[in-house]
Image (tube, grey):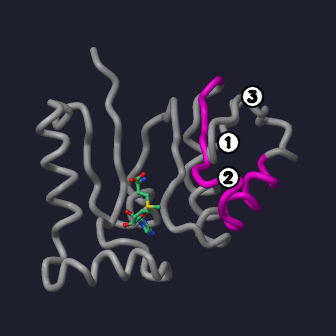
Amino acid sequence: MKAKLHCIDTFNGTANQQDHRDIFAAHGDDREWLFRTFQDNLKRYELDEQVIIHRMSSTEAVKSWNAPIAFLYIDGDHEYEAVLQDFENWSKFLLPGALISFDDVPGWPGPTRVAGIVISKQEFQKYGVAPNVLTFKKIS
Ligand SMILES: C[S@@+](CC[C@H](N)C(=O)[O-])C[C@H]1O[C@@H](n2cnc3c(N)ncnc32)[C@H](O)[C@@H]1O
C-alpha cells in the first residue's frame, strides 16, 4: 500500500506576505488559480489518489486530526507565532522515529527561531540539512 500524503493549505496564499499578495493580484479576480493548478498537477503526475487535500488553515485541520504521522513538513504561515503553533499542534502526532522538516531554515526568521527551540528539546535530534530545510528525528 502506498503511503498517503496529506496536504493542508488554504490555497489563498499567506495574507501577511507581500510576495503572495502580488502573485494573487497578478491573477486578478481568479482566486482559484493556485488550487486549480495544484489539482491539475496532481492529476498530471497521477498522484491525486495518494495526496489528500485539506483546503483549510492548519489550525482548523488539526481539530479533527487523530492519526499518527511519520513525516511532517511545516511550510505554511512563516510568522514565528504561526510556525510555533504548527509545531506544537502537529508534533504531538509524530511517531517515534518520525521526521519533521522545517522549510525556510535558515532563510526566514520565524521557522529558524522555532527550529532553534526544537534543537534544545531532548526528544528531537538533528537529522539532516538540505538547502534551506532543516529536518529532525523524533527519538522518543
Ligand atoms: C511558502 S508557501 C508554501 C507552499 C507549499 N508548501 C509549497 O512548497 O509549494 C506557504 C503556503 O501556506 C499557505 N498558508 C498560509 N497560512 C496558512 C495556514 N494558516 N494554514 C494552512 N496554510 C496556510 C499559503 O496558502 C501558501 O500556499
The tag earlier along the polypeptide, 2 or 3, is 2
Q: Nearer the viewer, mark 3 or mark 1?
A: 1
Which of these two is toward me, 89 or 10? 10
- Report if the CB atoms under discs 2 and 1 are less than 8 Å apart: yes
Q: Position of residue 95 (x, y in %)?
A: 58, 29
Residue shown at 67% from the left, 52% from the top: 105
SS type, badge 2: loop
Rendered residue at 17%/37% (across/down): 48
Magenta residues span 97-118
Instruction: Locate residue 66, reporting x and y percent.
Output: 43, 44
* Disc 3 secondary structure class: loop
Between 12 and 27, which is closer to the camera in this rendering?
27
Left or right of 19 in this view: 96: right
Instruction: Rate crowding at label 2 as few (under 14), some (14 to 19) or many (20 or more) other CA atoms within 10 Å.
Output: many
Image spot of residue 16 (x, y percent): 49, 82
Residue 140 shows which numbered tag? 3
Label 1 belongs to which residue? Answer: 134
Ligand 1 placement by image quarter: bottom left
Q: Amino acid at mark 3?
A: Ser
Q: Quadrant of residue 14?
A: bottom left
Which is nearer the N-term, disc 2 or disc 1? 2
On screen, residue 13 versus residue 34, left or right, reads right
For the C terminus, the quadrant is top right
Residue 25 is a magenta residue: no
- The dot on residue 105 is 2
The three-letter code of the residue at mark 2 reads Val
